[in-house]
Image: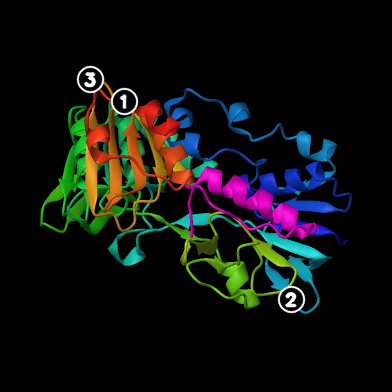
Amino acid sequence: MSGIIIIGAGQAGSSLAIKLRTLGYEGTVTLIGDEPVAPYQRPPLSKKYLLGEMTLDRLYLRPPEFYAKQGIELRINTAVDAINIAEKTIQIGSKSLGYEQLALTTGSKPRLLPSRIGGKLNGILSVRSLADVNAMQSAFDKGGHVLIIGGGYIGLEAAAVAAAKGLKVTLIEMAERILQRVACPETSNYFRDLHQNRGVKILEGVGIDSLTGDGHVNGAILSNGSTLNIDFAIIGVGILPETSLAEAAGLIQNNGIETDSWGRTSVPDIWAAGDCASFPFQGNRIRLESVPNAIDQAEVVACNMLGSKKDYIATPWFWSDQYEVKLQIAGLNAGYTNVVVRAGSSAQSHWYYKSDKLLAVDAMNDPRAYMVAKRLIEAGETADPKTIANPQSVLKELLRK
């Protein structure tokens, strides 16, 4: 077998395979995933799926039979053991498959706690795969006290679902405030109040010393010396790019698999896209963990695998659902110097500036602010902070200048 092989059957891998067919590629396309199900959406796992508001069939990116109809060979529940660069083959158990071009869309994996502090006990769950969340759903149904370790968006979304299901929820964050790595203090304050008003106990500046239990976790010793009796724990301390295959094959790593603006890795005929890949962005190198990036980057890579010379220009945006609040984020806030708060009766947005340049916005139940900011940022334009701060100003007017 030759043609194009895609390792990683998530959002990026599925998008890349479909784009190849849309562009008219007639060669063999093989999409390989290590999970036992067809490609599915990950964001709803910790939201609607965990709440029981979305069924498995609605999680699928495409109906499982779609891939065969498109001439895409989908191999699920299949682990790739190695890549042989010299022979242009991949190894699956005792069998090898040849490729003309190879795409790595291996995604990311959750950071886990070390076994020396009890990280291997049963009842310690992560939020990444369908299997993870199915296990979590069972624990949620039993009720009790859950400890959530990590106050980023993953941890906060899990806390929202747990609180909505009536569990006792304690969330700890080692940094001085929740969302410290990704958001301004104003956004941290907004979500802290949101969760505390729903009964979630948030401890900031507090880490985990150890988790205890005989086989199954039943307690936690915190860094401040206090102890908790718990029924299970959820780890939400970030994710890492899944690069083990690429590293073993000798591909250059740089905050993930290093790619150029076309998606090429350091090895000819091997490409990468999605959570696992870093790429040039405005004079720097970044790696984005988001669905829009996975789709857009994968589709650019598909074009370039077929001979285009198309640069990937990222337009970062993200979202998070917590209780009745939809957070939409446009842009990247790295390097911001000041934040302008635009407050309304039921909506609020936080606008990040570097001096007078608009960098990003966090919009809570404010789709108009998100839309306007996104268009301004993509156009390289800014907005007068005084106009933004005035809740009576009409944001759409900013797009007409």
Query: Along the horizontal axis of the image, is 395 left or right of 78?
Result: left
Taking depth in this image into account, of 64 and 2 the one nearest to the observer is 2
Badge 3 or badge 1: first in the primary sequence:
1
Q: Nearer the viewer, mark 2 or mark 1?
A: 2
Q: Residue at x 28, y 25 (%)?
A: 393
Label 1's element?
helix
Q: Which residues are magenta?
A: 287-316
Crowdedness near tag 2: few (<14), some (14–19) or many (≥20) residues, C-alpha within 10 Å: some
Is the Cβ of the residue at disc 3 closer than 8 Å to that at disc 1?
A: no
Q: Which mark is residue 85?
A: 2
Position of 240 with respect to 94 (left or right) is left
| Residue 164 tag number | 1
The disc, 2 or 1, on the residue closer to the chain's N-terminal end is 2
The location of residue 142, given as percent across then percent down, is 35, 30
The residue that disc 3 covers is 345
Mark 3 neighbour class, 10 Å CA radius: few under 14, some 14 to 19, many 20 or more: few
